């Protein structure tokens, strides 16, 4: 077995962080203490790490009041790993997932039908960090053989991308150990305790790990150039995806959600990183500090999709990445047109 969770101490820390994150879900956090409109539909969306900057639009839409203005009640639930969020969606525990688009391809390969209804990130925003003591020893993913690599969790997009980068650089994923270490403090603790050699994570965890010399950057997918160099093309990441049957049965509700998100994406484009950070809950800066949070957001603001439309060449890149290593996808006939829809974005009405 080449994919593991971190050991007992790390698991306990991860569990504590997960419980705290769940307590900060939309139904329990101060930012979400608004009263629901009894006449509006209610949707529960599980996000694969609400405090990650790559998932910022979900909470920002709430902070801006755009859900209410669009006429939909939204409960945001924090789940550290996208793979677990997907399973909750399939089980009917939540109606939508804030996670990477590539999960829809993997699901279709398993005979399940889901689709992204709005694309929020044009590129992954992920960074492969390695422990500072390994600088000069680990120079590329070609050096991953025999290494312990941090991912969010099994079946997450960081798991997908790590396996792809390994295989692309001549390392069979079975020759490495991938450990689910979450993000934030659990990721940093795993690196400091040398439970992982390298790991894939996002802002603000990246800035925190770099600030005290814990890690160095091996690969940077926070820019279009870095993403294309690592993955071979445009790799759309964060999206809102839902089971196709639910979308088809609740089109009016989905349209309200997309109206809110398209408006949020436009707001991001017209405001500075400092303006955006000022709208976010204060605990999102915890560990890294507001100044570093703003600096990180300033440098990677270009990751956000300005329109919400799926990038034309993106799905093909995602399929090529998954097809490189994932046996559940390899050899399958995938209809990419069924893994996303631009219908709701094209019909979106701005809220303000």
Image (cartoon, helix red, strand yellow):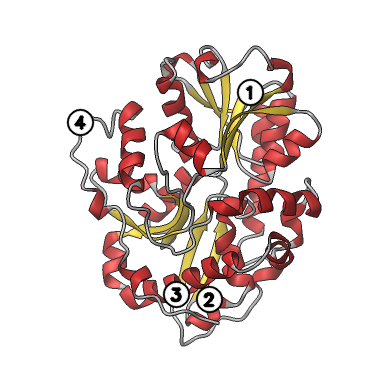
The residue sitting at 56% across, 40% down in the picture is: 126
Image coordinates of residue 243 in percent, x first then y, are 32, 58
The residue sitting at 34% across, 48% down in the picture is: 104
- Asked if residue 145 shows in the view, the reply is yes
The residue sitting at 26% across, 68% down in the picture is: 248
* Residue 52 horizontal side relative to residue 331, left or right: right
Report the number of numbered marks.
4
- Which is nearer the N-term, disc 4 or disc 2? 2
Give the farthest residue toward the front: 225
Q: CA distance from mark 4 to mark 3?
A: 37 Å
The secondary element bearing badge 3 is classed as: helix
- Which is nearer the N-term, disc 1 or disc 2? 2
Between 156 and 322, the one lying in front of the other is 322
Q: CA distance from mark 3 to mark 2?
A: 9 Å
The secondary element bearing badge 4 is classed as: loop
Q: Give me the disc on residue 331.
A: 4
Q: CA distance from mark 1 to mark 2?
A: 40 Å
* Neighbourhood count class around disc 4 (C-alpha, 10 Å): few under 14, some 14–19, many 20 upward: few
């Amino acid at each position: 077995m080449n994919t593991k969770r971190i050991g007992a101490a790390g698991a306990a820390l991860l569990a504590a962080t997960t419980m705290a994150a769940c307590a900060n879900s939309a139904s329990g956090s101060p930012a979400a203490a608004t009263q629901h409109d009894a006449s509006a539909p209610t949707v529960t969306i599980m996000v694969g790490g609400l405090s990650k900057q790559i998932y910022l639009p979900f909470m920002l839409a709430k902070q801006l009041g755009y859900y209410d203005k669009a006429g939909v009640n939204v409960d945001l639930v924090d789940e550290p790993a996208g793979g677990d969020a997907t399973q909750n969606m399939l089980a009917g525990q939540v109606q939508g997932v804030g996670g990477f688009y590539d999960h829809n391809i993997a699901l279709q390969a398993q005979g399940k039908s889901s689709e992204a209804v709005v694309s929020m990130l044009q590129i992954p925003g992920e960074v492969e960090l390695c422990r500072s003591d390994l600088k000069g020893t680990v120079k590329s993913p070609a050096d991953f053989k025999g290494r312990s690599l941090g991912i969010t969790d099994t079946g997450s997009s960081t798991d997908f991308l790590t396996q792809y980068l390994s295989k692309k650089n001549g390392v069979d994923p079975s020759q490495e150990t991938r450990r689910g270490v979450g993000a934030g403090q659990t990721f940093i603790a795993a690196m400091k305790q040398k439970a992982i050699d390298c790991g894939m994570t996002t802002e603000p965890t990246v800035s925190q790990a770099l600030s005290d010399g814990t890690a160095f950057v091996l690969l940077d997918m926070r820019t279009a150039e870095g993403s294309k160099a690592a993955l071979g093309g445009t790799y759309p990441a964060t999206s809102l995806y839902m089971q196709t049957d639910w979308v088809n049965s609740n089109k009016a509700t989905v349209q309200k959600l997309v109206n809110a998100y398209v408006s949020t994406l436009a707001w991001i484009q017209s405001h500075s990183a400092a303006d955006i950070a000022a709208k976010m809950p204060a605990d999102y800066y915890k560990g890294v500090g507001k100044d570093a949070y703003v600096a990180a957001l300033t440098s990677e603001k270009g990751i956000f999709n300005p329109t919400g439309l799926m990038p034309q060449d993106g799905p093909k890149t995602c399929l090529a990445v998954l097809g490189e290593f994932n046996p559940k996808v390899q050899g399958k006939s995938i209809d990419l047109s069924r893994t996303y829809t631009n219908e709701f974005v094209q019909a979106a009405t701005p809220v303000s």
